[in-house]
Amino acid sequence: MMEKSEGTLSPFVYWAQTDSVATLKVDLKSVKDPHLRIKEETVEFSANGVGAQGLKRYSFALHLSAAIDPDKCSLKVTDRQVDLTLCKTKKAWWPRLTAKPQKPAWLKIDFDKWKSEEDFDEDETRDIRRDFPEIYDKLQKEELGYKRESAKKIYLAIYNLLQFIGFSYVLIVMYIRHYKSGAESMEGTYEAVGPAMKFIQLMQFLEVLHPMFGYTKGSALTPFLQVTGRAIILFVMIEAEPRMQTKPVVFYLFLVWSMIEVVRYPYYITQLFNMENSILTWLRYTIWVPLYPLGFLCEGVVIIR
């Protein structure tokens, strides 16, 4: 393998892979006089170009973790970078690019390239992060020191957390009021927590948009019917009728809604991050059995009155 002399500069190299090829993106601009030497388990490259240290001669050498076919490998030089495509002799996912676990500091993972295989002219585009999550997460953690989450997942986690906080607030305020004043507190339930309930109820309309934009699985029809039904009860039957706002049924209705949601939203958060909580899972699929009929009963009372 090519030995680097003292003072030789190495460019940043970003790598990705499919089961059949590994790709190297060399971060050099305005490349001149490139030299590439490929053997079954080694890659050596040098060129003049503009890298992290300016316009200089850069080079690197890699001892690969598995064999490649030198005759099928290719080099593409553009004004912005150099792309190397290394064809594996056997279809397999490499646990790492280099033979040794210790990788050089200038070698990085090209996470953008890992997202799909569309650049490799395959008939079907695949999501590598979805198909091989363990390999992807392991490499990502080694590279960054932590697991980087997608913007969608972060958004959904924040949304579910805020909704959990909102319904928890409603429950806590209702509990404190009932603890201090007993049944007399029911009359002022809507005045005390109505604004908060209206806000988090309006926020739930985002759950109709989530499946439409691919943030969650399933149809948008189910959340639309559920959220719209609650909105009609809250804004048409209660908000628009001041006499209904002081009825005890509002207390029980808000209690049922909140108890359902303070379990549902934390459960969704655990599912986002592939975490298992047996108690939360049991509550998620059990608590609705008594609460949903009670909720329908309360909603029916509101409609009839």
Image: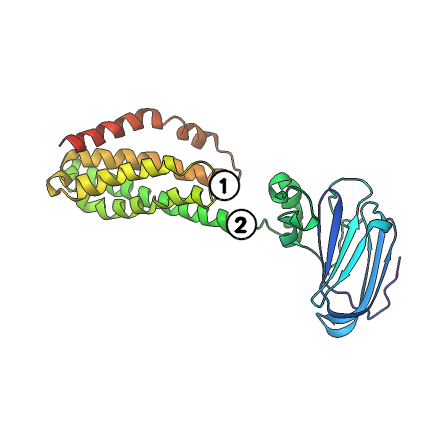
Q: Residue furthest bottom?
A: 55
Q: Is residue 228 above or below residue 141?
A: above
Task: State the quadrant of the N terminus.
Answer: bottom right
Q: Is residue 79 above or below residue 73?
A: below
Residue at 16% x, 37% y: name it: 186
Q: Quadrant of residue 291?
A: top left
Q: Residues within 10 Å of mark 2 (few under 14, many from 20)?
A: few
Q: Quadrant of residue 10?
A: bottom right
Q: Is residue 263 above or below residue 9?
A: above
- 279 sits to left or right of 74: left
- 6 sits to left or right of 222: right
Q: Position of residue 276 (x, y in %)?
A: 51, 34
Residue at 35% x, 37% y: name it: 261
Dot 1 and dot 2 residues touching (CB under 8 Å): no
Q: Which mark is residue 195?
A: none
Residue tagged by mark 2?
150
Residue tagged by mark 1?
272
Residue at 84% x, 45% y: name it: 67
Q: Position of residue 38 (x, y in %)?
A: 86, 55
Closest to the observer, 156 or 263: 156
Q: Considering only order in the chain, which callout, 2 or 1, is on the residue closer to the N terminus?
A: 2
Callout 2: helix, strand or loop? loop
Q: Position of residue 141 (x, y in %)?
A: 63, 49
Three-letter code for the amino acid on which mark 2 is drawn: Ser
Closest to the observer, 123 or 21: 123
Q: Residue furthest left?
A: 243
The Cα atoms of the two marked residues, 1 and 2, are separated by 11 Å
Q: Position of residue 107 (x, y in %)?
A: 73, 57
Q: Quadrant of residue 18?
A: top right
Closest to the observer, 121 or 79: 121
